[in-house]
Image (tube, grey):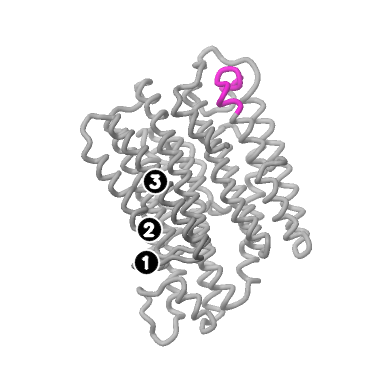
Amino acid sequence: MILFLIIIPFLIALGSFVVKKQARFLEALAGVGGSLELITAIFLAHFVWRSGYYSFAGFALDGLGSLTVLAVATVGCGAAFYSIGYLRAEVAKGIIGFRRIKQYFILLQLFLLAMFFAATISNPILMWVAIEATTLSTAFLISYYDKPTALEAAWKYLIVNSVGLLLGFLGTLLFLTTLPNGAEAHLVGWSSLLANASFYNPFVVRLAFIFVLIGYGTKVGLVPLHSWKPDAYGKTPTPIAALFSGALINVAFLAILRFKQIVDAADGSVFSSRLLLVFGLLSLAIPAFIILIQKNYKRLFTYSSIEHAGIAALGFGFGGFGSAAALLHLLYHSLVKTVLFFMSGNILLAYGSTKIAKVRGVISVLPVTGVLLLFGFLAITGVPPFGLFITEFTIIIAGFASHPIVVAGAIIFLTMIFIGFLRHVLTLSFGQPPEYAAAGESNAWTIVPPVVLAL
């Protein structure tokens, strides 16, 4: 079933490549592919839930991996169906043509293929290759509209992520050099690295984890490694931005957590936890100030993604039930942030601008989008009784006794983020709509996927 999960997006991409002048075929392939990927991920998660572990031909899946695969498949399925309506609306506006639609659906499936491969492969080198492949498959999507600012964002994305992942590769090699008895590194899986943790040199392990955290932290977008995110999220098609935030972050965190397990077994959890706490608190502090003065709603959601990556990093840094809450936090964030990015796509289609100053009265122009936008705001800012309130509260409780200063700082920054988010969402949702706003939802494809995810 793991092979089936990986083969599906490859076959859908191949099928999309051979389609000639039939956009409806491309849409059907995307919908079928997304559905099959989600069904397969559910079956895999159920199997791992019952048996605890599954491995086959160099691939392996445990509880952590199955949660990641499930998040990627869920967001990927939603993005596939939402893309149908979103691209139809852009075709109707004369923004893109068939060639661009074909390119989009091929790259979408290759992006999902790389993430599924990274989450299921048992070798750390091949995992690095797969995560690097996500960079290559999405760079062309960031420059999708061929605007100078989009091309600049794509180059920035390529350079920053490639350099970051190069450091992550160096950290991976350092981990492999610590293996005893001249073990063949290219055959070593996560279980072998963990089993040999007691033989590792603590200094080498610490140095290696610093490189790994910088490398994969760049993909997560932890501050100060986040510089590529606002431009990339803002210029790429909205469904891809949702996948960046709702799926890719989880896959990159999976790599960090795999290595953290090894570091904790070899040298204790203090060093890795402190690093995560530093990056986590920084990832709350910077978005807190930027969200207060943000002028672009897609960038607003981008900095919110950085914030929630920081919250998850704090949970993993606190450890214990803080780690469990951080895992649930990533899952809730995947669903809610995908809804918010889909809503940003609907607003962009109706208003033609991503500037907050040019958008008013969403609740009257786009009633369903407006309601979902308010829902997403309440959920993403951790208002009771939504799941993110439970996870944030649990993470704060987990760190309160051992790191009170960090927790106090986190509470202050979360309060600032709530105030900034509230001001911007109220501005978007209410007021007198401008004359150029196109009233009415674009089509059912842009409404049903986010409603299902919200539920």
Q: Which mark is residue 155?
A: 3
Q: CA distance from mark 3 to mark 2?
A: 33 Å
Mark seen at residue 56: 1
The x and y percentages for residue 199 are: 51, 84
**Contact flag, marks 2 and 1 (Cβ < 8 Å):** yes
Who comes first in sequence, dot 3 or dot 2?
2
Q: Amino acid at mark 3?
A: Trp
Q: Secondary structure at mark 2?
A: helix
Q: Position of residue 142 (x, y in %)?
A: 40, 40
Check disc 2 and report the residue beneath it.
2
Q: Which marked residue is nearer to the observer: mark 1 or mark 3?
A: 1
Amino acid type shown at disc 2: Ile
Q: Label 1, label 3: how many angstroms apart (C-alpha)?
A: 37 Å
Disc 3 secondary structure class: helix
Position of residue 59 in the picture relative to residue 435 (left or right): left
Q: Residue furthest toward the top?
A: 435
**Label 1 crowd bin: few (<14), some (14–19), many (20+), radius 10 Å:** few
Q: Position of residue 305 (x, y in %)?
A: 57, 45
Residue 110 horizontal side relative to residue 455, left or right: left
Instruction: Name the amino acid type tagged 1.
Output: Phe
Q: Give the magenta-colored segment's residue range.
A: 358-371
**Which residue does the image show at 67% across and 51% down from the upper left?**
391
